[in-house]
Amino acid sequence: MTPILKVEDLHVYYGGSHVLQGVSMELESGMTAIIGRNGMGKTTLVNAIMGLVPTRQGSVYLAGERLTGLPPYQVARKGIGYVPQGRKIFPSLTVDEHLRFAARPVSGGWDAEKVYEFFPRLKERWKQSGTNLSGGEQQMLAIGRALVTNPKLLIMDEPSEGLAPVIVDQLIDFCQKLKQTDMALVLVEQNLTFARTVSEDVNVMLTGRFAYQDSFEALMADHELTHQLIGVG
């Protein structure tokens, strides 16, 4: 089976700093999580996949098609939906305008109405400016905006950041429902409980490299390794 996502020996520099140092990963289908402490390179990896930062070496493939070197809008058109850290909601657009303007209709796929079914709170706020929403509502909108592009792969970067536990529980429920669809999902998270609940597989990033790529179960069974990599255990 051709992996939906393949990252091969990826190197990224910021000036003289070697931030990503030969990162490789594959996702055939379903879901995987990327975790690690702050400053380890998780968001840089996501930005490199999306074409938001240049790569010095390595390749990114989506369903066998090479994406490396493409501008971000073309990466998105190839089939990656992106929920960025910090949500990046447009202040001049209403909830409904975010969903209508981003939409790439597919028969039987995601549209504004289907997003409203998943996130009823957005339907109640459909005329409101995106920046007038609560943090949880903005996160729902950022996810919905990505979903209406009908991607093959959805990447969410720190979706639980700054959210109340009750909203995180709603995101967990959403991820569990999404796993029942054909869409693949990469979750970048620091909330270990969230990541463990929704994903069986995990990639632990440590100083620009993946130090562990296997099951969450095996990682958490090794208390010394867990403490070494993510500071718990």
Image: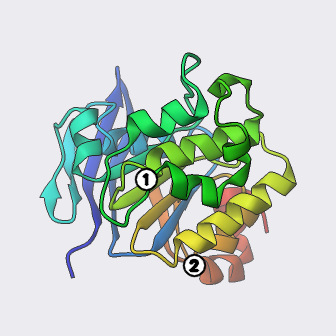
Where in the figure is residue 142, as x and y percent of width and height?
Answer: 56, 41
Q: Classify residue 88 by image quadrant.
A: top right
Identify which amino acid the numbered label 1 is placed on: Arg
Identify which amino acid the numbered label 2 is placed on: Glu
Q: Residue furthest top?
A: 92
Is 9 placed above or below 233 here? Answer: above
Where in the figure is residue 149, as x and y percent of width and height?
Answer: 37, 48
Under tag 2, what secondary structure? loop
The answer to whether any part of residue 157 appears in the image is: yes
Please tell me the numbered disc located at residue 200: 2
- Please give the residue where the numbered disc 1 appears in the rendered image: 209
Residue sitting at x 51%, y 38%: 84
Query: Looking at the figure, which quarter contains the N terminus?
Result: bottom left
Where in the figure is residue 205, as x and y percent of width and height?
Answer: 51, 55
Residue sitting at x 61%, y 77%: 216
Is 231 placed above or below 134 here? Answer: below
The answer to whether any part of residue 192 appears in the image is: no
For residue 41, side relative to residue 15 (left or right) = right
Is 35 placed above or below 103 here? Answer: below
